[in-house]
């Protein structure tokens, strides 16, 4: 890819294609980004999430979580968040700054729930909330479901915990590493049209 100023749009289109691949292909590097929030002590809290949906027109990234997760409390206190993607083979890093919106028991979660497998629904049947302390190494999934998927009826009980996090993209920091010379581009979406700035890597 040539990296002249005239090619800002082609870089953005390439980012768009990679994020789409991250949703569709579970083996793609962009399928499991690192997602960071601020916890109540104002420390950075990071974890890997699964990219479930990407919408280029609205510049939004989506993943699923449990409404009882600590990240929900963190986002209610501070909706600013960040994604980190890295494709080793492409030597390409994206740092994406977002504002997150919590969806629980609404039309967005209903639509996503309909596409969720029974195996995935099982995760939301845990009897204790994520990150709670326990005396034993366990996940508190009901014992009758050990090694098997829930029935459709059983799985529906997890819907109350199922949550979709919508993340509106504010800024993308694109970094391409190459022996011929590293290149870094910042794309800001907070105005009426994208602003592109070359940065020193």
Image (spheres, helix red, strand yellow):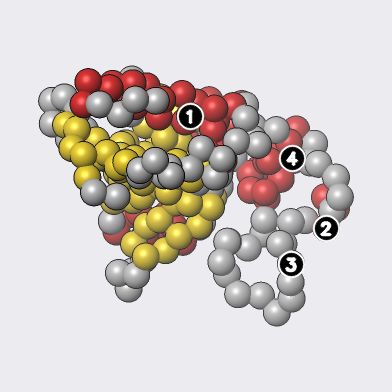
Q: Label 4 near label 3: C-beta < 8 Å?
A: no
Q: Label 2 near label 4: C-beta < 8 Å?
A: no
- Where residue 191 sits, quadrant-wise, is top left
Task: Tell me residue 182's x, y (percent).
Answer: 35, 44
Indicate which disc, 2 or 3, sits on the residue closer to the N terminus: 3
> How far is the residue under mark 1 from the one under mark 3?
36 Å
Indicate which disc, 1 or 4, sits on the residue closer to the N terminus: 1
Q: Secondary structure at mark 4?
A: helix
Q: Secondary structure at mark 3?
A: loop
- Where residue 27 sits, quadrant-wise, is top right
Q: Secondary structure at mark 2?
A: helix
Task: Tell me residue 1's x, y (percent).
Answer: 39, 25
Q: Nearer the viewer, mark 2 or mark 3?
A: 3
Residue at the disc numbered 4: 119
> How far is the residue under mark 1 from the one under mark 4?
27 Å
Q: Nearer the viewer, residue 57 or 87?
A: 87
At x 28%, y 56%, the residue is: 78
Extreme-front residue of the structure: 180
Q: Nearer the viewer, mark 1 or mark 3?
A: 1
Q: Residues within 10 Å of mark 2 (few under 14, many from 20)?
A: few
Task: Tell me residue 166's x, y (percent).
Answer: 39, 37
> How far is the residue under mark 3 from the one under mark 4?
17 Å
At x 50%, y 57%, the residue is: 47
Residue at the disc numbered 2: 143
Task: Tell me residue 147's x, y (percent).
Answer: 86, 50
At x 40%, y 29%, the residue is: 15
Residue at the disc numbered 1: 18
Indicate which disc, 3 or 4, sits on the residue closer to the N terminus: 4
Q: Residues within 10 Å of mark 3 (few under 14, many from 20)?
A: few
């Amino acid at each position: 890819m040539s990296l002249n100023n005239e090619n800002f749009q082609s870089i953005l289109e390439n980012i768009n294609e990679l994020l789409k691949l991250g949703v569709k292909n579970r083996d793609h590097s962009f399928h499991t980004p690192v997602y960071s929030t601020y916890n109540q002590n104002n420390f950075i809290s990071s974890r890997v999430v699964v990219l479930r949906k990407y919408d280029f027109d609205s510049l939004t990234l989506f993943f699923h979580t449990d409404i009882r997760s600590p990240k929900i409390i963190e986002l209610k206190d501070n909706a600013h968040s960040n994604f980190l993607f890295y494709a080793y083979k492409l030597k390409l890093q994206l740092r994406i700054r977002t504002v997150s919106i919590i969806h629980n028991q609404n039309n967005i979660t209903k639509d996503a729930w309909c596409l969720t497998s029974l195996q995935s629904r099982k995760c939301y049947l845990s009897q204790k909330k994520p990150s709670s302390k326990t005396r034993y190494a366990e996940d508190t999934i009901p014992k009758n479901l050990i090694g098997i998927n829930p029935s459709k009826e059983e799985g529906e009980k997890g819907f109350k915990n199922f949550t979709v996090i919508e993340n509106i993209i504010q800024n993308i920091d694109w970094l391409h590493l190459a022996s011929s010379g590293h290149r870094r581009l910042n794309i800001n979406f907070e105005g009426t049209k994208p602003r592109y700035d070359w940065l020193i890597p």
